[in-house]
Image (cartoon, rainbow, N blue to C red):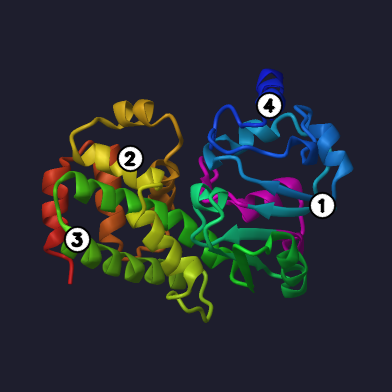
Amino acid sequence: MRRQDQIDEFKRSSKNPSYLTGLKFDTDRIVFTNKINELVKQVDTIIFATPSPFLKQHLKKLRVPLKDKMIISAIKGIVPDENLIITDYFQQFYNVPRENLAVLAGPCHAEEVALERLSYLTIACSDREKARALTPLFTNNFIRTSTTEDVVGIEYATVLKNVYAIAAGICHGLKYGDNFQAVLISNAIQEMQRFSSAIHPLPRSINESAYLGDLLVTGYSKFSRNRTFGNMIGKGYSVKTAQIEMEMIAEGYYGVKCIKEINENYHVNMPIMDVVYNILYNRASPILQIRALTKLMH
């Protein structure tokens, strides 16, 4: 943790002062530090869970090479400016070999994991054996794990599902009902498949939990920050006001800009993504944008 005062408070109360504050931790099993270089020197496997807009900033202090480490990303976003998914960023800027990069994905809201409600994770790695070796570390009586080699497809899916969750939230804020939400999500998964096939052609089942399952939970769940953010936009909040009131990061806000810019090279038909971008970045009317979108749904 970056701040020593937060570490002190965590140790004193056995609770994280910022997140999941109702959950008590066994702090005897946690080694706390605010010195990233000392930490990285001592470990062979690192899990990154920093929100994507802040990843570069956090890594600025890092002086220890990462190329010999196993890097696991639990980040569901894209690095802004570079417009790179997390594994590409570590490969290009930190020389981490592709086979040493893994992604943790699936419908797994932290709130439900903390409540020990059954959740399913997918570990993606180009080296299937390394992915299989990691699964026991994340498996227990309420977490099930599976593996895949589709690192790129899964990473883009985790970005897009946040974008579509914002769309679902906007529609909810505008008083569209469950029937339309179902059609929206149905069209969203098709849009996700078109984009994934264009950017990384690979045999994949878009209906698996790491794609469709994660989209559904992010689009519908009360724990979804992106849906909550979209809901506020639909109710008339400005982007800035919604971000201030949220306190936590809705990564879809950053993700939609990155995907929009990436898609300029691919020209995939993505009407839902375009509408979310227009509302968030061009200050277009949510009412008019969603009304126009309804005519494209089927």
**Residue 63 visible in image:** no
267 in relation to 8, above or below: below
Amino acid at pointer 2: Phe
Counting residues from the N terminus, which is met first, the one under dot 3 or under dot 4? 4
**Residue occupied by mark 3:** 178
Q: Which mark is residue 69?
A: 1
Label 2 and label 3: CA atoms lie apart by 18 Å
Segment tinted magenta in the rendering: 74-101
Q: Which residue is mark 2?
A: 229
**Residue at image location 53% in from the left, 78% down from the top:** 202
Q: Secondary structure at mark 4?
A: loop
As shown in the figure, which amino acid type bears the numbered disc 4? Answer: Arg
Say which label, 4 or 1, has the lower sequence index: 4
Name the mark on residue 2: 4
At a point 52% along the width and 51% down the height, the residue shown is 76
Q: Determine whether label 3 and label 4 are within 8 Å by CB.
A: no
Question: Which quadrant of the view contains residue 23?
Answer: top right
> Which residue is depicted at the point 27% across and 48% down?
169
Categorize mark 4 by other alpha carbons within 10 Å: few (<14), some (14-19), many (20+).
few
Of the numbered discs 2 and 3, the one sitting upstream in the chain is: 3
- The alpha-carbon separation of the residues under discs 4 and 2 comes to 26 Å
